[in-house]
Structure formats: structure tokens, C-alpha cells
Image (spheres, rainbow, N blue to C red):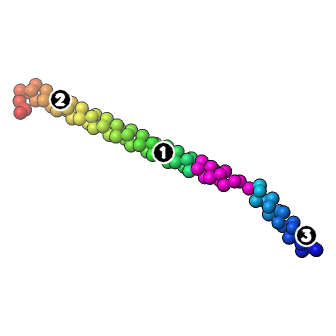
């Protein structure tokens, strides 16, 4: 009799645990939300990397423009100095 009662009790507890667990739809919904969240984080990461690369490119262009302006200024100053001395640069 004890064995029968033990088996019935275990069966009842097992049925209770299975009945209280999440349904298949809930599990799929949770997995989809997790995948969507991971995708959103990856998109933000890629956008952030793209923004940093764009800023670096702008900074490189600004540096190149400043160097060109500096070289043009030096060339103009040298030309004016040579002209003031009476010599002509070709």
C-alpha cells in the first residue's frame, strides 16, 4: 500500500510541476524576445562603430586640409620673401 501511495504522490507532484511550467508559446515568445534584443544590441554596436569611423574620417580630412593650408601659406611666404629680395622663383 505504501508503494502505491508513493507512486500516486510522485505522479501528482510531477503533473503539478508540468502543469505549472511555461507553455510552448511562452517559451518561443521569450526566445524571440531574446533574439530581438541581441539583434538590437548588435545593430547599436555596428552603428556606433560606423559613427566612430565617420568621425575619424572627418578628422583625417580636417588634418589634411590644415596641412595643405599650412603648406600653401609657407609657399606664399617664401614667394613673397623671394620677390622682396629681388629674386624670382619659377
Looking at the picture, tell me which residue is in the foreground, 37 or 14.
14
> Which disc number belongs to residue 77?
2
The number of callouts visible is: 3
Residue 87's x, y, as percent? 5, 29
Q: Are marks 2 and 1 in contact (CB under 8 Å)?
A: no
Which residue is at 77% across, 56% downward? 19
Which residue is at 93% across, 73% downward? 2
Looking at the picture, tell me which residue is in the foreground, 71 or 79.
71
Residue under pointer 1: 43
Residue 53's x, y, as percent? 39, 43
| Mark-to-mark CA distance, 2 and 3 | 105 Å
Which residue is at 16% across, 32% downward? 75
Residue under pointer 3: 5
Which residue is at 89% across, 74% downward? 3
SS type, badge 3: helix
The answer to whether residue 82 is left or right of residue 70 is left
Q: Which stretch is magenta?
A: 21-34
| Mark-to-mark CA distance, 3 and 1 | 57 Å
Amino acid at each position: 500500500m505504501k508503494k502505491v501511495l508513493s507512486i500516486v504522490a510522485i505522479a501528482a507532484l510531477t503533473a503539478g510541476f508540468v502543469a505549472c511550467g511555461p507553455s510552448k508559446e511562452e517559451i518561443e515568445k521569450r526566445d524571440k524576445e531574446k533574439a530581438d534584443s541581441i539583434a538590437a544590441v548588435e545593430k547599436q554596436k555596428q552603428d556606433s562603430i560606423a559613427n566612430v569611423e565617420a568621425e575619424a574620417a572627418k578628422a583625417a580630412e580636417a588634418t589634411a586640409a590644415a596641412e595643405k593650408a599650412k603648406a600653401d601659406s609657407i609657399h606664399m611666404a617664401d614667394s613673397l620673401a623671394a620677390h622682396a629680395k629681388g629674386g624670382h622663383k619659377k
